Each structure stands twice: as C-alpha cells, then as structure tokens.
Image (cartoon, rainbow, N blue to C red):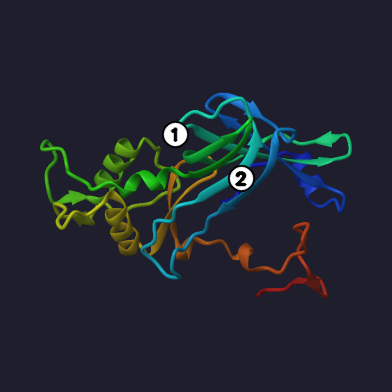
Amino acid sequence: MAQNTSALWKTLLRSKTVTKEYGFDIAGTWYGPEQEVSHTVESGLYEQFGIGNAATAKLTMSLFANDIPRAAAIKRYIRLRDKEQATEWLPKGIFFANRRSDDSGYWTVEAYDAMRKAEAVWTPDQTLTFPMTMPAAVAEFGRIIEVELDPRTVLNPAYTIDYPANDYTIRDELRFIAAAHGGNWIMTDEGKLLLVSLLSIPPETSYLVTEYGSAITLGGVKILV
C-alpha cells in the first residue's frame, strides 16, 4: 500500500543511479546493510485470484548477528541511496521468526507476518454474544493476534457471523468476512490488519510506468494497461 514519503525520496526514486538499502530491527537490535547477506519476501494480495483471501507474507533472510531469539519480532525497513544522499527509513513489514539456524554467527531465518497467528482455532470467550457483527469480530481477532486494525478498513456493521463450528480458525473467519466485503486481508508495511476491497484499488496502479516510477505517456496521455 502507498506510504507517505519525503521530497528526497520522491526525487531519488526517479534517479537511474539509485540503490535500495534494507535494515532490520530484530528483537530491539539494529542490523543494517553491513550485516545483511540476502533476503527475500514472498507476499501478495491473493493466495488465489479473487476475493476472500487472508494472505500471509514470508521473510527468508541470511545475516551476521550475535543472537536471534526464538520467535523474535523482525521489523524490516527500506531506504534509497544515491551516492552520499540517503532517504529516511520506511517500514516494510513486521515478521516473527519461525525457524532459525546459526553457523558461527551466520544466521539463516524464516519468518512470517502476524497473519500466521490467525491459524489458531477460534474458541470464543463465553462473554461474547452471537450473532456478532463483523466489525466486533475483527476487533476481537485483532486483540487475540495482537495487531491493530488499519483505519482505512471499512466494514459493514449490518453484517454478522455465527458462533464458529468445525474448528474454524481466526483466519477462516477473516476469509469469510473478506468475501462478504468483496476484498482480501493483508498485513500492511506497518504491521496493521487491512481489508483491501477490489473496488478500492486506485486507477493509478493500472498505468504503465518506467522502472523508476515515471508514467509512460503517448502524446502526453498516460497509457492504461
């Protein structure tokens, strides 16, 4: 999703000599580009094309570190650099270590975002009443998996869910709620739960652009793809 960036970020983004640098806050310890060997992130709005998805993002990384605790929170950041100029760091996801191995200070880590926590079977607190409105249910799910709801999420208060059956997980319920609203759930770069309606995707995402983010035009008109 779009993030607010500085004027310098917008300028460097269009530079042909710009490079990207990544940093990681792992359990409160900072690891910059000097410690990172490599990393990849697998994420997307869809598990399968359509609505009713609740996508989990996966981080795989290698780096030099003294220690990476079990289930460590890993906050990923990015900035742009062009020679001596460097932008602010922007958040690019929060993950939690799942598997890790150490070879004399060379660590390999597999981590997932908070959507992975939603795989737990949902046994509602006995103080809750059903049918429950979908906004109330999502608030309860956020409390359980310890994430905030992105304020851009719009839920219909008239829609409800019944008491869960057949060992439904929190993620199953989120998929049902997403489908009812014609969208999909993701975790944002700031680690918040966001419902993305397919009707809310801005038209700018359909314009043809260069690798530096500039719109390609024909006779001064942007090319729609």
On residue 71, the disc is 1
Instruction: Give the mark count.
Output: 2
Q: Which residue appears farthest toward the front when viewing the image?
A: 104
Relative to 116, does residue 64 appear above or below in the rendering?
Answer: above
Q: Amino acid at mark 2?
A: Gln
Question: Which secondary structure lies at badge 1?
Answer: loop
The residue depicted at 62 percent of the width and 63 percent of the height is 205
Give the class, few, some or many, for how many residues have Cα within 10 Å of label 2's Cα (few <14, many ≥20).
few
In which quadrant of the rendered view does residue 222 lie? bottom right
Identify which residue is drawn at 59% across, 30% down. Answer: 25
Residue 158's disc number = none
Quadrant showing the C terminus: bottom right
The three-letter amino acid code for the residue at tag 1 is Ala
**Cα–Cα gap, marks 2 and 1:** 27 Å
Instruction: Give the quarter of the image for residue 184.
Output: bottom left
Residue carrying label 2: 3
N-terminal of the two: label 2 or label 1? 2
Q: Residue 44 at x, y = what percent?
A: 52, 58
